[in-house]
Amino acid sequence: MDVRLDDKVAIVTGGSRGIGQAIAEEFLRSGATGVVVTSRRPENAEVAAAAIGEATGRPEAIEAVVARADSRDDADRTVAFAVERFGSCDILVNNAGTNPSAGMLADVDQAAVEKTWQVNQMGPLLWSQAAWHGWMGANGGTIINTASLGGLRPGAVLGAYNVSKAALIFMTRQMALEMAPGVRVNAVAPAVVKTKLSAMLWTGNEAGAAAMHPLNRLGEVEDVANAVTFLASDKASWITGVTLPIDGGVDGTGASGTLA
Ligand SMILES: NC(=O)c1ccc[n+]([C@@H]2O[C@H](COP(=O)([O-])OP(=O)(O)OC[C@H]3O[C@@H](n4cnc5c(N)ncnc54)[C@H](OP(=O)(O)O)[C@@H]3O)[C@@H](O)[C@H]2O)c1
């Protein structure tokens, strides 16, 4: 199967590193006309755009925009920029995410919870609204949300984060119903993928963390990017409202003891 994104333009929030950067690169390798990545910081945005352009050999097809994941104004501005610069906005990946708190919900700090829910849950709503009103409602498209295995099952470590991702998974289903048939909305639910965000879960004990996944390794950013590219492509044109675990077999096998 040849998964292609020819003639499609994408926005990837939180594309300055980690999973988002890998998604942007795979989209360009799959022929996307253009990709716009977002970051909060101008220096991160510039470095990421240069790195993605070099890695894919397509510097003319990547743009980086400074934007907050939880700002409707920034989302509207970014969608308008994608349409003006590349001609459309066919794919939105709500990937930016944060995890400033750990521990039991009974003890978690209110400000940390509010930030987590604002970025992980409100952000995808605001950016999806912007994409719908700025392009997709009239022209069609597809939205992919980066959720988490922790949104599918409770875990011991990241309570507030897991609740935000569970809400995102339900929002995926709700939006899929509301936006059909013109716009498909799906999510991915990774377990532990080796990035800055997850470093506290595996640094110093990678073998132990890997052993909690039946396939006995941690995820690489490409594992997620490949699945997102498929869901974004026309090869997935009869798939909407689903959340795909990308988790080394944890959810499917019912394995216990995951850190996610
Ligand atoms: N890594 C894992 O194990 C794992 C597992 C399940 C789900 N996920 C999810 O995967 C997504 C990507 O995570 P990652 O592991 O690739 O993390 P990462 O390497 O830390 O990257 C996070 C990205 O999000 C951006 N970001 C963070 N907070 C933001 C905010 N308030 N506004 C705008 N952008 C913001 C960062 O950009 P700047 O700092 O440049 O602004 C960066 O590009 C997240 O939604 C995360 O919850 C990760």
Image (cartoon, grey):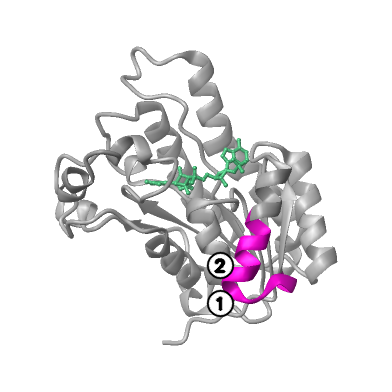
Whether the residues at callouts 1 and 2 have beta carbons within 8 Å, the answer is: yes
> Which image quadrant is residue 57 in?
bottom right
Determine whether the residue tagged by mark 2 lies in a helix, strand or loop: helix
Could you tell me which residue is drawn at 51 percent across and 75 percent down? Answer: 237
**Residue 194 or residue 166, whichever sits in front:** 194
Q: Which residue lies furthest to the bottom in this view?
A: 1
Q: Position of residue 2 (x, y in %)?
A: 46, 87
Q: Quadrant of the N terminus?
A: bottom left
Picture disc at residue 25: 2
| Location of mark 1 (residue) | 29
Span highlighted in magenta in the image:
48-61
| 32 sits to left or right of 148 | right
Could you tell me which residue is drawn at 78 percent across and 70 percent down? Answer: 86
Considering only vertical position in the picture, is 3 above or below 85? below
52 magenta-colored:
yes
Q: In which quarter of the image is the C terminus?
A: top left
Could you tell me which residue is drawn at 32 percent across and 56 percent down? Answer: 219
Query: Mark 1 is on which residue type?
Result: Arg
Q: Could you classify mark 2 by the number of other residues whose Cα lies within 10 Å: few (under 14), some (14-19), or many (20 or more)?
A: many
| 239 sits to left or right of 129 | left
Q: CA–CA distance between discs 1 and 2?
A: 6 Å
Q: Where is residue 62 in the image (x, y as percent from the top left)?
A: 70, 66
Q: Which residue lies furthest to the right in this view?
A: 84
Q: Where is residue 48 in the image (x, y as percent from the top left)?
A: 63, 55
Could you tell me which residue is drawn at 80 percent across and 71 percent down? Answer: 87
